Image: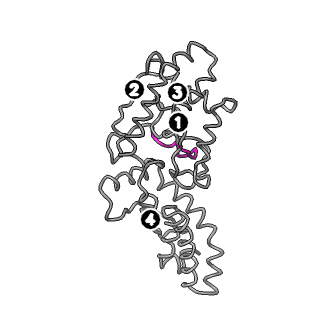
Amino acid sequence: MIAPNEEPQVVYQTCINSITNEDLRNRLNALTNTIEASASEYHQKAKVNQLYTLPPNDCGNDDIALGSVTKNELKNVYSAHMVGGSKPARAIYDSLLSRAPLGRCPFCGMGHASTLDHYLPKTKYPQLSVVPLNLVPSCKDCNTGKSTAVATTAESQSLHPYYDHEYFIDEQWLYAEVIQTKPATIRFFVLVPANWGPISKKRVQSHFSDFKLASRYSIEASNQIACLKDILSRYRESCGLEGVRQYLMIEAEGNYQLHVNSWQTAMFQALANSDWYCGSGFQ
């Protein structure tokens, strides 16, 4: 996923320039260099997988967070002056949102990207509220379902769509198995390549857990399996068990080419490899 190239200082200034309260605008203006420095530190830490070392700000919403600005006032730079449809910075919001590949959420790969997620939550990092590299297109389920707890170790960090190594995208780590129930159900799990280091392995598992992907993918798979019954019955009548398996393998290969770690890829692979499902499990 291509990272945004908007300058943090320009984004911040665009947001605060729409504030009519002169006192608040002046106090926020005084933080411009601090916000820019925070954005630069974020970028440097993210490049080396060390965002977990950034200390969270645990002060109260009405307490001073930076300079003479409260945490709430910093958070509202995003909520009131970037998200608002009539604000000049809304154009930046929409531009960031449009970076989602095929309009899909990069965290789960299935939901429609309809909002921006703060990778590091603005409740803990208010100085990063409008830093573009901290704003990732997301579906509502991933945005609202993710915990606001922050990672304290390298391995507990979820994947960052703007920074993480290509092998998180290009190498398969999401798999599934068929559970012999009526109707069949699918269990999704993480199985990373043997050559990956221990931190990468744990990060993928953290990502899988943080976004509750096992249960969410299983629900989607159940809906898809219900739609397969009739078409697989026709393949079974005309081509036998191998016809069913061939159809499922074609679907698996097509989805693999589109997205290696999609739930569809893992599901169709599992279905094609299940003698029980190809034989009678789909009926």
* Contact (Cβ within 8 Å) of mark 4 with mark 3: no
Q: Is residue 105 visible?
A: yes
Residue type at tag 1: Glu
Image location (x, y in percent) of residue 258: 56, 65
Disc 1 or 3, which lies upstream in sequence?
1
* Contact (Cβ within 8 Å) of mark 1 with mark 2: no
Is 16 placed above or below 238 here?
A: above
Tell me which segment is drawn in magenta: 136-147
Mark 2: give few (<14), some (14-19) or many (20+) Cα within 10 Å.
few
- Identify the residue under disc 3: 75
Image location (x, y in percent) of residue 97: 60, 44
In this rendering, would 266 be left or right of 101?
Answer: left
Residue at left offset 47%, top offset 22%: 31
**Gap in angstroms between the C-alphas marked 4 and 2:** 38 Å
Disc 4 or 3, which lies upstream in sequence?
3
- Identify the residue under disc 1: 7
* Residue 140 magenta: yes
